[in-house]
Image: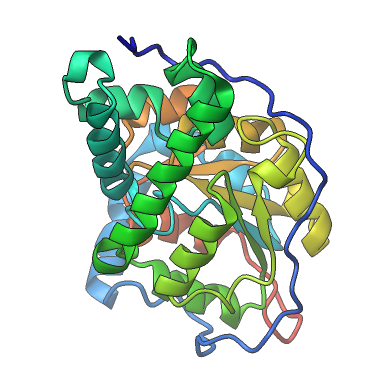
Amino acid sequence: MLSPRAPAPIPSRRRPLSISAPSPSPGRFSNSNSISFFSRGEEKRGRISWTRSEAMASDSAALTKLAPLEAILFDIDGTLCDSDPIHFSAFRELLQQIGFNDGVPITEEFYSANISGGHNDDLARSLFPDMDHAKAMQFMDDKEAMFRKLAPGQLKAVDGLHDLCRWIEGRNLKRAAVTNAPRSNAELMLSLLGLTDFFPVLVIGSECDRAKPFPDPYLKALELIGASPDHTFIFEDSASGIRAGVAAGVPVVGLTTRNPGKVLSDAGASLLIKDFQDPKLLSVLEEVKPVTANGQV
């Protein structure tokens, strides 16, 4: 019988560093010089609601100090897209097939607490502590193959993502995608979302010395795009990813796509948002005064 255990962060085995950093190409998004995520009335109501949330305003202080904003880094799974339901389905089916937990299907709560945001090498060790590691990694490879099979029919962008991307392009902000997902998964998700050209840099955790929750992937992204952590923030949806960003010295905005807000706050998120249309995010974007394409703040 294979008994589930909560995974603990374990440093990945060292691998040669191989980061994808293709030359930027013209984006698919038109320039925009104003925040247009909401209608005027909705935006106004959002700002009023936001100013009354004193506790959250205090937490976002680390973000407003970033002005002028220079760059934004994004996780992929659960951040750009709500992919966790697809991962959960693949894990549940394959774990049940091999008799994990006496064949009792895993719950969403178990997935959130023990799997979501984890790096495959670490998950293989924590889920299957008594299994040969090569065999455990083959299970993880099979799971990723099932994810890639399911994703084209199910993957959807988080609400407001493409509006935010237009806003970022309109200000010529630097950006990178940083993920613990295998390269084949990451490239597929970016392609399905129409964001392959939007991100000039894609950093894969397993291709760094250490994956998230260590800071290495985010530090490498900052190096590749030539950005300062003093003028950059990160979008993340998992505790593991938030810990990685905080360890890199970069404020993190946590998306409560699937994981509980308290878990993300405890991991160190400076701000929690529901999606990229959240009025709290819009208020912060107005405060950080990013440099525009013509060099004006």
Can the viewer see residue 77 in this picture?
yes
Q: Is residue 8 above or below residue 269?
A: above
Instruction: Between residue 123 and residue 210, name the one nearer to us.
Output: 123
Horizontal arrangement in the rendering, residue 98 relative to residue 264 (left or right): left
Horizontal arrangement in the rendering, residue 59 relative to residue 108 (left or right): right
Q: Where is residue 128 in the image (x, y as percent from the top left)?
A: 45, 17
Q: In this view, does 274 lie above or below 173?
A: above
Q: Where is residue 195 in the image (x, y as percent from the top left)?
A: 50, 74
Q: Where is residue 216 in the image (x, y as percent from the top left)?
A: 74, 38
Query: What residue is rendered at 58% in x and 76% in y?
Result: 198
Query: What residue is rendered at 24% in x and 31% in y?
Result: 97
| Quadrant including the N terminus | top left
Can the viewer see residue 268 in this picture?
no
Query: What residue is rendered at 62% in x and 50% in y?
Result: 233
Quadrant location of residue 260?
top left
Q: How many labels does the image show?
A: 0
Q: Where is residue 291 in the image (x, y as percent from the top left)?
A: 70, 72
Q: Which colour scheme is used?
A: rainbow
Q: Is residue 80 above or below residue 160?
A: above
Query: What residue is rendered at 75% in x and 57% in y?
Result: 19
| Quadrant including the C terminus | bottom right
Instruction: Between residue 283 and residue 27, name the one nearer to us.
Output: 27
Instruction: Between residue 121 and residue 10, name the one nearer to us.
Output: 121
Quadrant location of residue 45?
bottom left
Instruction: Between residue 126 and residue 131, name the one nearer to us.
Output: 131
Quadrant location of residue 72?
bottom right
Q: Is residue 152 above or below residue 284?
A: below
